């Protein structure tokens, strides 16, 4: 979703290749002939769905990283190696098709003009499935997504080893949940309104109540962006009324960084709330799934409300800022804002105590196999 370790507000230099240029890039770098190509939405990189000629007519995603992030090849390699590791561990993660030179990525010029920007290019296996954003996630799927999020972080933190992993220490990375206070420098993009007021409230409470507790949280490697467009699912049931979903793909590792287990569950809860018809109830189901793998400590649970609020603030503020830089991509950039502001405001109206009570009672009900409560309000 995001760009750069540097938290300074600056253009992200998103690639802007046409389909013909992208097809030529696949041929030149990877030695494959493109039979069909189509653009895919992206936050600040450029992605293409590609079919290549030959037996099997294989499908890939051509990922062209923005020129800012392309200056950090070791970080991109760490992310790509993590994807390869997860695939080898049985997780539904894409893997890279090697370049003609046998590498997992290649730094390429955007065009032939002298001084043109360079972009890191990868060709990743295409993962079939439906984005969670396209369906109505039921309690079973929310639980499954929570369990999946915990499992990904756990295996990455316990088993993933590579010389580039040190690059995942991204201290000033604006999307790391510890850096909610850095939103101060982007908040101008909101103007003066009730939205800005609630974000300022989130930032101040985050500084007072979350930052001092970070050292008590359990550290790990976070995927960091398990949003409803980055999780693919398929249905294992023929029943349209009560489909049983499973996670069939995990996308976009560009926000990976060292963080804390509780960050991942908070980020996941926030994004699963976006399109939910009953958003305040989402957290309990996701939390139950997460805690089936990694039970949270009392300190971590106590920070969950503000961590979810902090992720709402990050997503909404940074999207507003980035939309000023790239107005032509405003529709995609502001997807979260369509319901996100309403959900954040409602969380604060209902209050931390009531929201947490609902989440924790729902999670507890899974352990006791009793009906889970529903919370209305958003």
Image (tube, grey):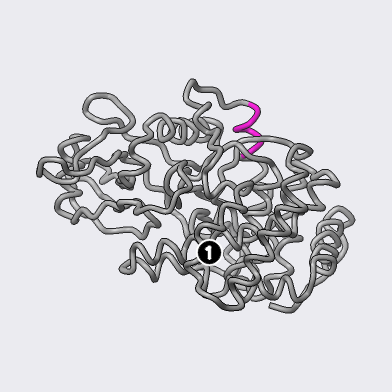
Question: In the figure, residue 106 lies in which quadrant?
Answer: top left
Q: Give the residues in magenta.
A: 153-158
Question: In the figure, residue 296 lies in which quadrant?
Answer: top right
Circle 1: element type = helix
Residue 60 visible in the picture = no
Residue drawn 48% across the image and 43% down it: 253
The location of residue 368, given as percent across then percent down, is 89, 56
Residue 208 in the image: above or below residue 6: below
Residue drawn 86% across the image and 47% down it: 298
Predominant SS along the magenta part: helix
The residue lying toward the viewer, choosing from 55 and 299, is 299
**Residue 309 belongs to magenta span:** no
The location of residue 202, given as percent across then percent down, is 68, 62
The location of residue 336, given as percent across then percent down, is 52, 67
Residue 278 in the image: above or below residue 70: below
Residue under circle 1? 187
Residue drawn 10% across the image and 43% down it: 112
Count neighbours of disc 1 (C-alpha within 10 A) and say few if under 14, some if 14 to 19, many if 20 or more.
many
């Amino acid at each position: 979703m995001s760009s750069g370790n540097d938290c300074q507000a600056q253009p992200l230099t998103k690639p802007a290749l046409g389909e013909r240029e992208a097809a030529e890039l696949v041929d030149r770098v990877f030695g494959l002939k493109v039979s069909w190509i189509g653009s895919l939405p992206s936050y600040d990189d450029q992605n293409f769905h590609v079919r290549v000629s030959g037996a099997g007519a294989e499908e890939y995603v051509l990922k062209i990283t923005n020129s800012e992030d392309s200056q950090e090849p070791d970080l991109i390699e760490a992310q790509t190696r993590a994807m390869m590791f997860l695939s080898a561990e049985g997780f539904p993660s894409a893997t890279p098709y090697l370049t003609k030179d046998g590498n997992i990525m290649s730094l390429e010029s955007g065009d032939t003009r002298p001084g043109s920007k360079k972009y890191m290019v990868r060709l990743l296996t295409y993962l079939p499935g439906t984005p969670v954003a396209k369906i109505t996630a039921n309690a079973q799927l929310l639980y499954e997504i929570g369990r999946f999020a915990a499992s990904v972080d756990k295996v990455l933190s316990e088993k993933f080893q590579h010389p580039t992993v040190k690059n995942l220490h991204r201290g000033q990375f604006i999307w790391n949940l510890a850096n909610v206070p850095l939103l101060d420098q982007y908040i101008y993009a909101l103007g003066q309104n009730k939205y800005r007021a609630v974000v300022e409230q989130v930032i101040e409470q985050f500084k007072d109540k979350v930052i001092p507790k970070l050292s008590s949280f359990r550290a790990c490697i976070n995927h960091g962006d398990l949003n409803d467009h980055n999780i693919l699912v398929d249905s294992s049931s023929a029943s349209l009324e009560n489909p049983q979903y499973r996670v069939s793909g995990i996308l976009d590792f560009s926000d990976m960084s060292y963080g804390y287990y509780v960050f991942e569950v908070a980020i996941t809860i926030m994004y699963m709330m976006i399109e939910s018809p009953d958003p305040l109830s989402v957290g309990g189901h996701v939390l139950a799934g997460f805690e089936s793998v990694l039970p949270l400590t009392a300190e971590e649970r106590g920070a969950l409300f503000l961590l979810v609020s902090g992720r709402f603030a990050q997503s909404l503020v940074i999207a507003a800022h980035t939309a000023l830089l790239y107005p032509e991509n405003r529709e995609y950039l502001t997807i979260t804002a369509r319901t996100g502001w309403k959900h954040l405001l409602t969380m604060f109206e209902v209050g931390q105590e009531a929201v947490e009570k609902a989440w924790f009672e729902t999670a507890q009900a899974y352990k006791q196999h009793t009906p889970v409560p529903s919370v209305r309000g958003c």
